[in-house]
Image (tube, rainbow, N blue to C red):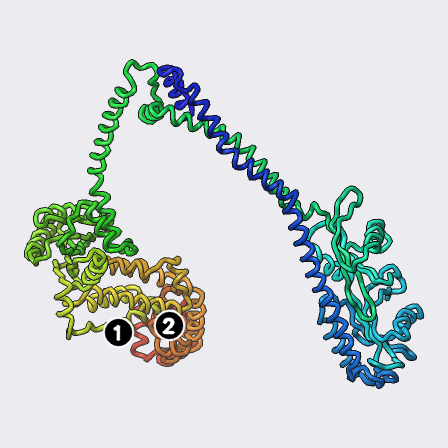
Amino acid sequence: MLNAMKKAVLQWRKEKPGTKGKFYRKSLVTLLIVSSIPGLITGMLVYSMAGGKLEKELLQLHKSQIEQRARNIDSQLTNLELMLSHWAFDSKFDYSLGNRDFKKDFPIAHDITKTLLVMQGSNTMNKVVGLYVKGGPSVLFEPEYGTIASQEEQAVYEGLLQPGQMTYWTKAAFDPSRPQEKELTLVHQVPGGSLQPFGVLFIRLDNERVGDMLRTMTPYDGGETFFMQDGGALFASTNGKGADSTFTADLREKIAGREANAGSFFFEYDGVTYTVTYGKFSRIADSWTYVTASPISSITAPVVFISKIIFGVSLSALLVAALLAWFASQRIYSPIGRLMTVLMADKSYEEAKEDEFTLIERQWHHLNRESSELHTKLTEQLPYVNESFLHQLLQGYLYAYSEEELLSRMERYKWKVTGQRFTVLYMQLTGMTSLEGKFKYGDEGLVTFAAVNMIEEFAGKHFEQSQTINFHDLSAGLLIAAPDDGSGNEALEAFGEELTLAVNLILKMKLTIAVGEPTASISQIPLSFEEAKHAANQREFGNENQWIDIGRLHSAGEGADEPQYPFTLERELLQALRTGQESTAYELLQAFLEALSCKGAKAVDVQQGMLHLLGSVQHAMMVSGIQPTRLFKCVNMYEQLSQIREPELILVWFRERVCEPFLQELGARSDTGAKRLIEQAMIYLQQHYMNDISLDHCADHIGTNPFYLSKTFKQVTGKNFIDYLTGIRMDKAKELLRESTMKINDVAEQVGYQHSYFNRIFKKLEGMTPTRYRELSQAD
């Protein structure tokens, strides 16, 4: 873009020599001066004010702030003095504490500790609030009860009992091992007002908190703030320096030479100018002097810094103004070049023979032609965009749009919406699995595409405005816009008849058409479509053509008989599944579906019935110890079943997706248990074969049902129950015939048979009579 602009400027200067000469330079200088002068003037004014009047104002403000904060500090110290005096005169600290054994009088010691803790927490500067009681041994509460062990520590606290001073401030080191660490302390002898005190109440202030308190007197970094007792005994500062530092000593000497008790002055030290403010604190029987010294540069620094910034910005603005002036000149003096750059893009036009306007005209025609071609392509794509919009509208995705916005979009897609009434049709194809169908399972998309083409053709014949939406699942939607005068009802019925006949003849399938409530509001179209879909679920369950009008459906539904759910077939089916009767279960499943889909049954009733059966089967699975989610691999079986509309497909799906996995799981789980069960049955037969044994007796003995025993016996042994029992009896009979001289009648009774039946079954199995078998055995 910049290269094109440079080329345009060069071309313009060649054609118009000298046009960017003097005026261009004057314009550039004027822009530069106009943009820079205000900043320079403002910087000079601010700088002069910072050096003169503004500096004095800031110093005065600084002094007022310090005096105000000094009064606050004085108030805090006064509060400490009043609080300590109040508690020193309290009855808790009377003469009764002088000779008391605090170890025995624990409640009194505990009460004193609580009182001291309250006093200690009353002010953030308090480090320790304590009570010293002299005696033998001396007692010290800080604030917990304790005794003083060392003489050095005893001397420190004895020093607090100064005669003639009831309450006073001092600075003492309470840790004899660290005498340099002194703390500002407020002391009051107890009991209050006594000429013979037995102890002291004292408040030890935190040095860091005292320093923080002093820092509040000046808001600036650098300098020093301290206070001192006029007698010189007490001294506290913000940075912890002593009273003998050079800076502090010079300040104290300077203040001592001034007659006024409070004031403010400038102080030169080590090449730095400080503004010093001092005053008096009136303390108990004493007077303190506070001093704060701040570098004047810290006070005036913000103003000076801002003025320097303004100067810097002004100088920077001079450079920016030069750049902006140059850029503005390019835009002012090269309009034709920019236009050529836009129209010609990357094509070179500097060496063209035509002038710029001829080139612009030719390029304009070219762009106009391209615009027409794009408009044609947009017109071709409009039906697909329209279908996408209607699909979102019917599905309710455009709920956030207002009625006016939807009307505007409909008009943009060439719909006439004024004075129109909208009707939504929902159509379903059925009969994919019938013998007459030309298609097979899996061709749903192809069938729906063919049906949509037929719908569009017939809708175009009967309605001026219509649009078909393909759902690709043997269903489609149709939106019709007709004049709101009731003339579209006959056309709607004629359309339905012709479309149904064509679908029957060409696709060999049945068609269900559900008509929603007409509406004049576009925002109500999704609701009408949803009602049409629900109405389609009210179709009779069977492969017949059906026309369902939502209005007639409401009136016809009143007083209609409710379908009966086949509970008996459900119980029998569940029993067959639990016992592993596969063929019986499939027969009962088909009978169950036929009972649901009897004449006059609605699709929604059949669907709900099958969903209920699915829930019952899953419950039976869980009762059997099988988790449905694991068996079905976390597939939403209800969602899959609700999408199937064909009776045959429902039956196949239920068999393959529900029953077969359940039966296979039961079979796999029952192998080990079945073997143990049959072993028990075999032992029972070995022990009781001589008795009158039946399948029922054996099943009762081992704790199962006869049907399951018979089926499992065959699976495990390869023989049925009777054949196995007969084999045991025959083996025992042959043994008796060979090895004993018992009569044939006795042998028959011994193995559990009557004589006549024994002879008959023996001959049938062995090919000879028992007598002949004995003869041959003995002969051998």
Q: Nearer the viewer, residue 116 or 624?
A: 116
For residue 194, side relative to residue 272 (left or right):
right
Q: Nearer the viewer, residue 362 or 656?
A: 362
Where is residue 639? Give x, y as percent: 31, 59
For residue 651, side relative to residue 314 (left or right):
left
Q: Residue at x 39, y 75 (%)?
A: 704
Where is residue 47? Give x, y as percent: 62, 40
Q: In the picture, which quadrant includes the C terminus?
A: bottom left
Seen as rendered, the residue at the extreme right is: 151
Residue on which the image places disc 1? 567
Amino acid type at circle 1 is Phe
First of labels 1, 2 by sequence position: 1
For residue 281, side relative to residue 420 (left or right):
right
Q: Residue at x 19, y 57 (%)?
A: 521
Camera sees residue 438? no
Q: Residue at x 19, y 54 (%)?
A: 433
For residue 139, side relative to residue 59 (left or right):
right
As drawn, 466 above or below 101: above
Amino acid type at circle 2 is Leu
Residue on which the image places disc 2? 725
Where is residue 128? Give x, y as percent: 78, 69
As drawn, 690 above or below 340: below
Q: CA distance from mark 1 to mark 2?
A: 39 Å
SS assignment at label 2: helix
The image quadrant that residue 71 belongs to is bottom right
